[in-house]
Image (spheres, helix red, strand yellow):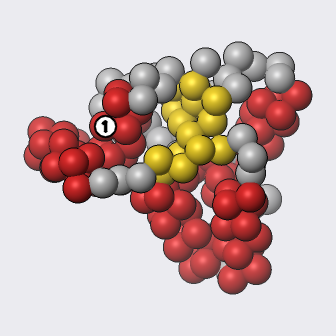
């Protein structure tokens, strides 16, 4: 099965004081051990940007750079690109969900997940569900 990793998953893993830290570490550990059915991992260039920018300001440059390095060197993580075509589709999704205050990055995630037939998102963000996607944990 395919799993999309949202910024919240990376952020919670990197920040020990994050309220979801232990849940994130547990799921990342389960993924690496093969204890869960997700073996194809995805994220996007927008999620990488969102993650490292947040960590830079909230956790400092060391944590942001370490997290970026972990994301870039992971042999199991495929980074999907938000192209002009994906942005165009995300614009439509955003227009439909703007009143729910769903982020534009989450709208690009919806488009990418649907195009790649990704089963679920590893996210602590309820906006994923607002967009009609499956969220774990």
Q: Nearer the viewer, residue 103 or 1?
A: 1
Q: Nearer the viewer, residue 28 or 1?
A: 1
**Residue picked out by circle 1:** 111
Left or right of residue 81: residue 97: left
Residue extending farthest bottom: 61
Say which residue appears at 74% left-offset and 51% top-offset.
Answer: 74
Left or right of residue 137: residue 112: left
Residue 82 percent location from the top left of the image: 35, 53
Q: Examine the rendered structure and indicate whether residue 45 appears above or below residue 114.
A: below
Say which residue appears at 83% left-offset and 34% top-offset.
Answer: 32
Q: Examine the rendered structure and indicate whether residue 71 appears above or below residue 80.
A: below
Residue 78 percent location from the top left of the image: 59, 44
Say which residue appears at 34% left-offset and 30% top-offset.
Answer: 115
Q: Nearer the viewer, residue 49 or 18?
A: 49
Left or right of residue 44: residue 17: right
**Residue 34 in view:** yes
Say which residue appears at 75% left-offset and 19% top-offset.
Answer: 36
Could you say which quadrant of the image residue 40 lies in? top right
- The image quadrant where one finds the C terminus is top right
> Across the whole image, how many numbered discs are drawn on residues?
1
- The image quadrant where one finds the N terminus is top right
Q: Nearer the viewer, residue 6 or 76?
A: 76
- Callout 1 secondary element: helix
Residue 72 percent location from the top left of the image: 67, 60
**Residue 98 in view:** no
Residue 56 percent location from the top left of the image: 61, 78
């Amino acid at each position: 099965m395919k799993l999309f990793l949202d910024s919240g998953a990376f952020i919670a893993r990197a920040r020990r004081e994050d309220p979801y830290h232990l849940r994130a570490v547990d799921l990342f550990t389960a993924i690496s051990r093969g204890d869960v059915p997700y073996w194809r991992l995805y994220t996007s260039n927008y999620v990488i940007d969102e993650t490292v920018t947040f960590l830079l300001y909230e956790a400092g440059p060391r944590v942001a750079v370490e997290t970026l390095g972990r994301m870039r060197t992971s042999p199991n993580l495929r980074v999907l690109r938000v192209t002009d075509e994906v942005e165009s589709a995300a614009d439509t999704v955003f227009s439909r969900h703007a009143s729910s205050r769903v982020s534009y990055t989450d709208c690009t995630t919806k488009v990418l997940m649907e195009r790649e037939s990704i089963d679920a998102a590893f996210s602590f963000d309820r906006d994923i569900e607002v967009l009609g996607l499956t969220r774990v944990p």
